[in-house]
Amino acid sequence: MHEMSICESILGVLKDQARAQKFDKVKRVCVEIGPLSGVEIEALRFGFDVVMRGSLAEEAILDIIETPAKAWCFSCGKDIVLTERYDPCPDCGSHQLQVTGGEELRIKELEVN
Amino acid sequence: MCTVCGCGEGEVRVEGVDKARGQKHDHGHGHGHGHGHGHHHHDHQHVHDDGHQHHHHGDDGTLDYGAGEAGAAVPGMSRGRMIQLEHDILAKNNSYAAENRNFFANHGILALNLVSSPGSGKTALLVKTIELLGDRLKSYVVEGDQQTSADAERIRATGAPAIQINTGKGCHLDGHMVGHAVEHLAPEDGSVVFIENVGNLVCPAAFDLGEAHKVAILSVTEGEDKPLKYPDMFAASDLVLVNKTDLLPYLDFDIEAAIANARKINPAIKVLQVSAKSGEGMDAWIAWLAAARAMALAGHPLGTAAE
C-alpha cells in the first residue's frame, strides 16, 4: 500500500507549487502512470481521496494517463509492447528484454485557481 | 503521514532518536545532518508549443487560460489555470537517496538494500554474514520493521552497530529515514552498511535509498514462482540470494525454475544459493561482497591504500 505515500508525495508537490505559482485550490491533477511503476491504479485513486481530504486539493479530480510498457528485444532487435515484466518478446519468444517505457510516475499537469 | 517527508506522522521512530521529543517527527531539529531539506525539484516546467491561441504563456511556464485582456475565460465554464509540470512524483525521495549515495561514495562505504518477504531469513543471514566478515570488513546495519527493535538487538549481539527504524504503518523505508539512521550510525570510511528493508516484496521496490545494490532474498520455502508474482522487486535487484538451501531435501522447490523465473524478469540478475544455517554457499556471497566493496572503494583514498 505504498500508494498512500505516493499520494502524500503528490500533495507535497501541490503545496510547493501552490506557494511558487500562487494558487490556493487544485481542481484537477493529471498524472502519468506506467504499468511497470509498481502502482496499483485503484489503490492510488482510493489513497488520493483520503490524502487530499481537507487539503487544497480536497475536491480535485484525479486524471490518470496510463502509458504503455515498452521494451527492446536483445534477440531480434525489435521494439515491443509489454503488459507484464515477465512477458516474452511476441515475435521471437526471448526474455532478453530491456524495458524502455512503462515506469512513469509523473505529475503531468494541474488545473488550479 | 507527515506531508513534509512522507513519513508516518508520529509513527516512524528511529531508535534512540527523538525519544524525548514525544511522538511528532521534528523537522526543526538542530543536529547537523547533511540532508537538504530544501526543495530540490526536478520539475522542469515548460510551455507546450502547440499553437493554441486561447491561453496565456506566463513567464513562469504556466499556461493561463484566464489571464487574457478581459481576465476571463469562456462564459459559463469555470476553467482553472493549467500548469504543466512533468514532475516526477518520487523526486523528493530520490533527492534524499541521492544525498545518501553521495555520502556513501565520499566515504567509500558499500551500502546494500536487502529486500524480501517477511520470514525469508534476512536477519539470520545478516548475523551469519557479519560473523564471517569478522574483522575483515566493519559492518553496520539499519533495520527496518513496522514495530519492535528485536532485529537490531539480534544484530547488536554480533558486536556490529545497528539502528532500528520502526515505520509504524509504513510499508517501506525511504531515503529520508535512511539518511537519519545513517547519520546516527556514523559508519566509518570503507565499511559496509546493510539496510534491511521492511519485509515486503512490493513497496520497497519503488523507493531508492541511495544503495549501491538491492539484494533480494528468496527462501526455498516460498515457491519458485515468486519472481513472477513480484516482478518489480526482482527487476530492481542486482543479486538474488536463494536462502535456506539446507531445507531443499524436504521440499519440492525447483531451484532451476526459480532462477529461470528471476532471469525472465531481469536477464542480468545474479543468483547465489546460500544457507545461513549450514553455511553452504556463504563463501560465494562473501566473495560477492568483497567485489562490491572494491567497487565502492574505487576512487576513494582507502581503495589505493589497500593495494
Image (cartoon, rainbow, N blue to C red):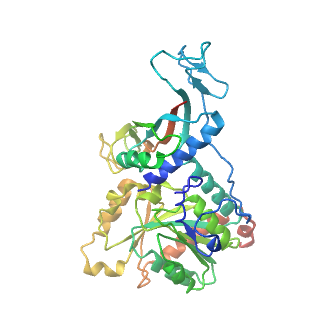
Q: Position of residue B11 (x, y in %)?
A: 52, 65
Judge by depth and name the residue closer to the eye, A69 or B56. Answer: B56
**Vertical side of B164 occupied by B76: above or below:** above
Judge by depth and name the residue closer to the eye, B108 or B165. Answer: B165
Q: Position of residue A84 (x, y in %)?
A: 34, 47
Q: Position of residue B36 (x, y in %)?
A: 69, 54
Residue A76 found in image quarter: top left
Q: Quick check: can you spot residue B43?
A: no
**Vertical side of A48 occupied by B75: above or below:** above
Q: Quadrant of the N terminus of chain A?
A: bottom left
* For residue B59, side relative to residue A111 (left or right): right
Judge by depth and name the residue closer to the eye, B148 or B129. Answer: B148
Callout count: 0
Q: Quick check: can you spot residue B144?
A: yes
Q: Position of residue B126 (x, y in %)?
A: 50, 77
Q: Residue at x 62, y 76 (%)?
A: B16
Q: Quadrant of the C terminus of chain A?
A: top right
* For residue A35, side relative to residue B248 (left or right): right
